[in-house]
Image (spheres, helix red, strand yellow):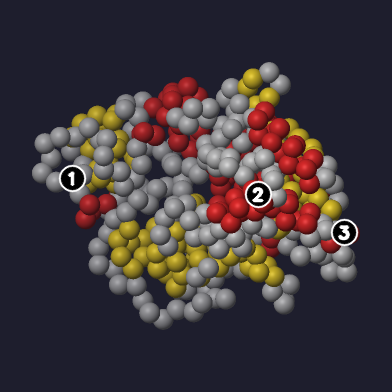
Amino acid sequence: MQREGKTPSETTVVVAMSGGVDSSVAAALLTEKGFRCIGVMMRLWAEVSSGEGSGNKCCDEESVDDARRVADRLGMPFYLINVETPFKEKVVDLFIDGYSAGLTPNPCLACNRHIRFDYLLNYARRLGADFLATGHYARLRRQTDGSVQLLRGTDAHKDQSYVLSMLGQAELHDLLFPVGEYTKEAVRGMALARGLPIHSKHDSMDLCFVVDDDYRRFLRAWAPEAMEPGAIVDLSGKVLGRHDGLPNYTVGQRKGLGLSGTSAPLYVAALDHDNNQLVVGPAEKVGRTEMIAEGVNWTLGRPVGAGSRVQCQIRYTGRPIDCLIHHLEDGCVRVLFEAPLSGISPGQGAVFYDGETCLGGGLIANMGRDEVGIGGNRTVGQQVNSGN
């Protein structure tokens, strides 16, 4: 895809490089089509740095070397830019603050919102680039009316549209996802066939700034007040035991609660931050048929119609669930599910789909204790309009 009136050789694409197989193949596919590509890698903050490099697993010295070797092989200029300060402020600090407030934040959503598709995209624009390309497994469909739809990636196991749900038309018009049409296996095969030195490299981890992948240890070091022990209580407020810090638990969790002698299995129903209590209950009581999502972004720039039947996905690897959307004030929506849903964690993303089309998403709002265990037999209405 090139800008109207431009040939590929006249089209400049900044490729976000990570030293991994996906971004490397994205760069290879674009250079083979004749695009004028520039590789850019971001140096991100990490809690430990070594020498002049970062301890962040997405941009350690090995990854920088891998990205530079790929760029050299493809004949691309390569730049390493320092984004440690905005990454710390917009991603890491929000991660710490979220857990300190009893939420379960998703740092990938924050990184894409504030760093990759804000800071880096604007950097690409300042370079005069026509597009920013990344190695995400998602697809774009450019419509005849000029709008751009965000679609799930072809590989259902690698689809990353969930963490791209904050994108709007202003961003989507300037993006390319070259590997979104392929499976991961095919992408590795393309890397091998092209002799790229990273064809067998392992995928990067989500918590790239935590050196040992132990976010609990990280929070004990950076937010010890969030890890204060407290009471485990049932839905009536009866004390059943003690927890060792709310960030150690997630809504819907059953194992590792340290409770014994109960007549039925108990699950985490809520993290009561105000009282530093872990609220638990039986499976039939912890599901909810509705929730509030706040800060909702619509990828097409307009909301779906009130009462629209769509699908909602509440975790990156979650299954999309049929629901109805009702609009509230200040960019919030009320989501009504057809059946009680467990594992609704405030702070996580709630992403909406119409089949393969990502409509947008927001964050699950923090709910009070009186809303725990809503569940029940609510019947979702049938008269809706698609809004598309």
- Mark 1 or mark 3, whichever is nearer to me: 3
Amino acid marked by disc 3: Ser
Above or below: residue 2 compared with residue 317: below
Which of the image's four quarters has the C terminus?
bottom right
| Nearest to the observer: residue 20 or residue 32 | 32
Q: Which label belongs to residue 265?
A: 1
Amino acid marked by disc 1: Pro
Relative placement, left or right, of 116 versus 246 is right
Q: Which label belongs to residue 9?
A: 3
Distance (Cα) linking label 3 and label 2: 23 Å
Q: Which element carries disc 3, helix, strand or loop?
A: helix
Above or below: residue 82 compared with residue 320: above
Q: Which label belongs to residue 143?
A: none
Residue 296 visible to the viewer: no
Task: Provide the residue designation for mark 2.
Answer: 191
Residue sitting at x 52%, y 54%: 158
Tell which circle, 1 or 2, labels the residue nearer the N-terminal end. Answer: 2
The percent position of residue 234, horizontal first and vertical second, equals: 21, 42
Which of the image's four quarters has the N terminus?
bottom right
Q: Which element carries disc 2, helix, strand or loop?
A: helix
The percent position of residue 251, horizontal first and vertical second, equals: 34, 45
Residue sitting at x 65%, y 65%: 140
| Nearest to the observer: residue 388 or residue 10 | 10
The percent position of residue 256, horizontal first and vertical second, equals: 27, 35
Residue 273 visible to the viewer: yes
Q: Tell me the crowding category of disc 1: few under 14, some 14 to 19, or many 20 or more residues within 10 angstroms, Cα based.
A: some
The percent position of residue 376, horizontal first and vertical second, equals: 25, 63
